Image (cartoon, rainbow, N blue to C red):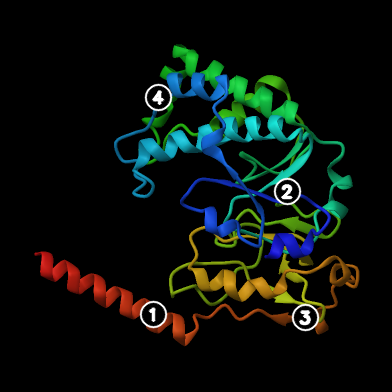
Amino acid sequence: MCVRGGNPAKRVFLLGDESNLLCAKGVADFADCREFNSNGVAVFDRLFKPIECERHRYNKLGGTANWLKFVFRRWFLINEFLRCENINSFWTFDSDTLVLAPLAPREKRFSAYAATTQCRDCCLNGFIGSRELVERYTKCMLDLFRDEDYLVAQRQRLKQHPGLAFNEMDAFCEFRRRENVRTFHAAQPLDGEFFDDALAYDANFEASPHKIKNHITVKRLWFNPVGALYARHLETGRFVRMITANLSWLPDYVGKKLARFCLTPAQDAKVKPPVEAELREVDLSQPLTDKLASALKRRLFEMKRALGA
């Protein structure tokens, strides 16, 4: 509901399949990726080959090969979706990202760039200035998978990093280098605001003294009387407003706690520069109900495992 409530004038889409169809209800228009069968998608399916080392593991969504194919293939699906809907500039975020404020007022600041990046400046994400950029990016991916010398070089590189794999971020960095694409890393403070790479990635920001579930380090967060969220930037010591919060690797209760800080345009207009004395720290401790539910799930899992032994 956050992205819709904060951006009532924008078209909001969830690209997915039958597994997340219900997630779009009341939140976004649903676009079924199974309907996008362009020539580019077909060519990618023919050329794709997973390039990974023996220690690279991903146990969800059918395993590592399936996941690696997805992170590349989604850009071909996005490109086809943009063509079908006649969309040029747009915002894109993973579905585990909370959009905490209206996006349209933030677009002008990126006008000098082709797009923004996240994931430590390695992935195309956030504001993208044109569909033509996505078209070129996907074309570059196909060129890379056709280039056996390049793939051999990737296999050699990964021998030094046996837990990794060649992924869409590597392809984007190569595309940006080859075409000299000008991007801006949106996790860097700009105009007193930033777009979060991941709440569980605290680089350049003050870390919370309390770990999620006693082992996950996250950024320390504050909120002002209007409900805007802030993190303290270590280099400057200033409080910087968080416009999106990426919840990767975090339990669901964190998103539920932060959802109340998603502001409408009317609320956003009332936000003023932060005054430290007015800020209160966000409590991200695990609710008792969530602890009990987690304990019950763990106990049921242990019982099933014991019965199957």
State the separation of the CA atoms marked 3 and 2.
24 Å
Q: Amino acid at mark 4?
A: Lys
Q: Which residue is mark 1?
A: 293
| Crowding at mark 4 (Cα within 10 Å: few <14, some 14-19, many 20+) | some
Residue 24 falls in image quadrant: bottom right
Q: Residue at x 83, y 43 (%)?
A: 110
* Residue 289: image location, x then y, percent: 45, 85
Q: Residue 234, image x and y in percent?
A: 70, 63
Spatial CA span between label 4 and label 2: 31 Å
Residue 93 position within the rendered picture, expressed as x and y whole percent measured from the top left: 64, 49
Residue that mark 3 sits on? 279
Q: Residues within 10 Å of mark 3 (few under 14, many from 20)?
A: some
Disc 2 target residue? 186
Q: Horizontally, is 18 left or right of 298 in the view?
A: right
> CB of mark 3 within 8 Å of CB of mark 2?
no
Secondary structure of residue under mark 1: helix
**Residue at image location 74% in from the left, 30% down from the top:** 131
- Residue lying at the far left in this picture: please name it: 309
Q: Which residue is mark 4?
A: 49
Q: Is residue 55 above or below residue 221?
A: above
The mark that comes first in sequence, 3 or 2, is 2
Q: Amino acid at mark 2?
A: Ala
In front: label 4 or label 2? 4
